[in-house]
Image (cartoon, helix red, strand yellow):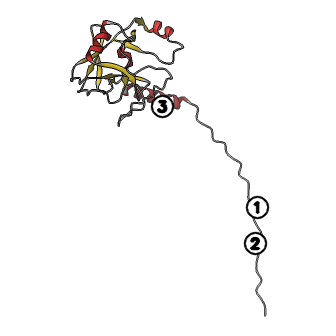
Amino acid sequence: MPCIAYFNSPQDKAAQLMGLIIRSSAIHAAGCYSTTAVRKGTRVAEYTGPRLTKDEADAANEDSPITYLFGLGDGAVVIDGHCMAMFINHSCNPNCETEEIRGRVWIRAIRKIQPGEEITYDYCLYDGGDDEAICNCGAKKCRGTMYSREEIRRRKAAAKKAEKKKPAKRRTRTKAIPIPRQPEVVEEEDAA
């Protein structure tokens, strides 16, 4: 069932006028969908919400399994999403991308979006601790994670380095047990 009236910010009202709705998603719980065709290059939504330092956001979401945080610039400040854009899910084959302009974050179409299509962008996550950030986008070339390709490479290199630091397993030699020799049996020839 679509959810339209939940959000009341001017940005969300503009998104509603543009034809965005929230409904169930095969990618993750709820998603943001377009009810109209969207041209390539169109700003679809703005990611809005309180701005927090990374430390404030970490403390506020310490026990939360799901967050809607969007890192700005170098990641020192994040937006704690409280808008329709927080429902835009990750895809390894997205139809949108994010762009930061003068401290504002826009979701922009990178190709034509059909009516009824879910709005997605590549989260390109980084520095997520031990979180696997499993991707459920279902794209043909799905990475299997929401981490960026660079972060995947960094994690693989770190794992390889950690593996090298592990002490090598010592092989234990088993003591050879001598096999007793059997006495040779000499057959006597028949003397007949």
The residue at the point 76 percent across, 75 percent down is: 185
Residue 132 vs residue 102: left or right?
Answer: right
User: How far, Cα to Cα, is label 3 from label 2?
Assistant: 57 Å
Disc 2 marks which residue? 184
Which residue corresponds to the image point at 77% horizontal and 83% vertical from the top-left? 188
Cα distance, mark 1 to mark 2?
Answer: 12 Å
Q: Amino acid at mark 2?
A: Glu
Q: Is residue 11 left or right of residue 53?
A: left
The three-letter code of the residue at mark 1 reads Pro
Q: Quadrant of residue 11?
A: top left
Q: Are marks 1 and 2 in contact (CB under 8 Å)?
A: no
* SS at circle 2: loop
Circle number at residue 86: none
Q: Sequence-wise, which precedes: disc 1 or disc 3? A: 3
The residue labelled by disc 3 is: 160
Which residue is labeled 1 in the image? 180
Please tell me in which quadrant of the rendered image residue 4 appears.
top left
Q: Position of residue 161 (x, y in %)?
A: 48, 29
Image position of 64 with respect to 50: above or below: below
Q: Quadrant of residue 68?
A: top left
In front: 159, or 132?
132
Extreme residue in the bottom direction: 192
Classify mark 2: residues with Cα within 10 Å, few (<14), some (14-19) or many (20+): few
Q: Position of residue 77 (x, y in %)?
A: 39, 8
Mark 1 falls on what kind of element? loop
Q: How busy is the neighbourhood of tag 3: few (under 14 within 10 Å), some, or many (20 plus)?
A: few
Q: Judge by depth and name the residue closer to the eye, 8 or 88.
A: 8
